[in-house]
Image (tube, helix red, strand yellow):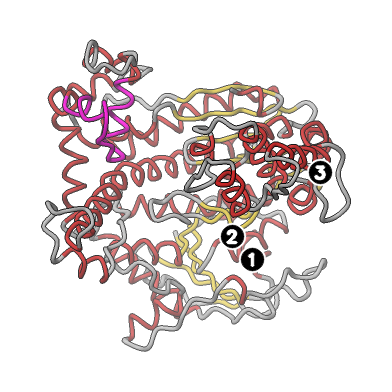
Amino acid sequence: MRTAVAVGPGTGGVLRTLAEDGTPAAPARAVPDLVAAIDGQERADAPRWVWPSTARLYPRLLDAGVRVARCHDLELAENLLLGHAGRHGEPRSVRAAWARLRGEPVPPDRQPRDRPAQPSLFGDDAGQDEPADDIEQVVAVHAAQQRAIAGLDGFALLAAAESAGALVAAEMGHDGLPWSAEEHDALLTELLGPRPPGGLRPRRLQDLADRISAAFGPRVHVNPDSPAQILKAFAAAGLPIPSTRAHVLKRLDHPAVPLLLEYKELSRLHTAHGWTWLDTWVSGGRFRPEYVVGGVVSGRWATSGGGALQIPRVLRRAVVADPGWSLVVADAAQLEPRVLAALAGDRAFTEAAAHGDLYAALSDAFTGDGDGGLTARAKAKLALLSAMYGGGTGEAVQLLAVLKNRFPDAFGYVEAAARAGESGRLVRSRLGRTCPPPSAGWRELTSAGDGDTPPGSQQGTAARALRSRGRFTRNFVVQATAADWALALLGSLRRRLTVLTFPRLVFFQHDEVIVHTPAELAGDVAAAVLAAADEARRLLFGDTPVVFPMEIAVVDRYADAK
């Protein structure tokens, strides 16, 4: 059973029961308290809720202590369907979808900055500035989506997984990642010195800045935050360089280089995750970021605040479980190469991917090849990554030739995706997530290129554009399918954790999850992770022998997991 939801002004709304194909199964009914109505029906029937946006409505339910098992997120589904049709970037709101159905002008989506400020403490003004949803539009758009999804192989699972991911994202933002402000402050003090007054550099950074200037001589003052001043100082010292990137600096023999490298690292920590970040994003012992489901075209998530997907390794010691609780940290080993093995169906490659260490299992194909001093396992890894990401220089050329000879179907799979991209065609993930089409400018540029011309010419520019899109689509089919698998894992794991009642998913990053759990349930959570990974494998790839092993650690703090 499905129930459509239209959020009304104030606390009310409209609900309507639907059949699985989206046709109405009962009259619409207005409810004065939408949250209470959803809570009551969830307890009684646990329908799949059909609503415009999980990101907008579900936090309101979570704040009231209401959690739901399933939903269909109309905006996310519309975005996937638009992408499948090669129409990335078109408005995806219910109003926009309704207008498309009726052949009317399509209104733009509301931008995040246009949304109302956070409601007051008691919620009396919750949603008062948001326009009310129209239940007729919700029902019609959902029915149209169901018809479209029914004609696309695998897409029903993709839409369900994307919607489940939206529930997980909202719940993780609500529950928060356990975070010790005391540990974080102690770490910053240890590395940077005491917290400085506003606007000043921490003591350690100021000391490094003074030593950097001194390294260039008594008459030179260099602001290490100014690349222009750094370039000028090195040029004056007879060491002209094109940029201040770390790999460029490391080639220089100058006393300022190690100081600059240390300054860059500590300054990055202070800017991105210093005391201001701590004040903004951590409260009540929890870090609560804002996740954006499908924020990247490949299906990977992004964040609109907090930088949860880029927690530096040095900060992981601040992620500490509550007393009596544990962190179950699990990540998929060598996920993308295993996805390629399952996608390609290459028999020899698939047999190798049935082992724990894929690179080691493939290493016999590379023994004695190349002269770069790499181990056979390292060569196998380099060859696979080059095949998936489009590498083709140095020893990688020889290793790719070995890969092509030993595993022709695997190599051919990504090569076909690259050729499709170079010809301007679309490629898709296992479940149907679709890459963006090339721009009109790309088509105009590449229509005159023959791919075999001097690099500085117009045709040479076109050839580079062709190769660049080929590298993108080559990786897209693998990375987007890995995102499909990860979403299926999240949905399955969330369902299994619900049975255990207390454990909470508190972190997700591409191929890694963290569950915060009572210590006595850690073993059950680990088993749930393994079962979810296997279910995701079967959902996407059927009875493939490729395994997707999860490396699991039960720890008190995140830093101890690896």
Q: Is residue 297 above or below residue 356?
A: below
Residue 285 place in picture, x, y as percent: 79, 42
Q: Which mark is residue 281?
A: none
- Which amino acid type is marked by label 3? Pro
Q: Quadrant of residue 488?
A: top left
Q: Is residue 190 above or below residue 123?
A: above
Whether residue 43 is visible here, answered yes or no, is no
Look at label 2 and name its amino acid.
Gln
Q: Mark 3 — residue?
A: 202
Q: Residue at x 15, y 29 (%)?
A: 404
Is residue 76 visible in this depiction of the protein? Answer: yes
Q: Dot 2 surroundings within 10 Å: few (below 14), some, or many (20 or more)?
A: few
Mark 3 or mark 1, which is nearer to you?
A: 3
Residue 167 vs residue 354: left or right? right
Identify the disc placed on residue 37: 1
Q: Position of residue 136 (x, y in %)?
A: 45, 80
Disc 1 element = helix
Q: Residues at badges 2 and 1 in contact (C-beta under 8 Å)?
A: yes
What is the magenta range?
379-401
Q: Check contact, mark 3 vs mark 1: CB within 8 A.
A: no
Where does residue 383 sit, x and y in percent of width and height? 27, 27
Q: Quadrant of residue 90?
A: bottom left
Q: Give the Cα separation between the discs numbered 2 and 1.
A: 6 Å
Q: Is residue 381 above or below residue 388?
A: above
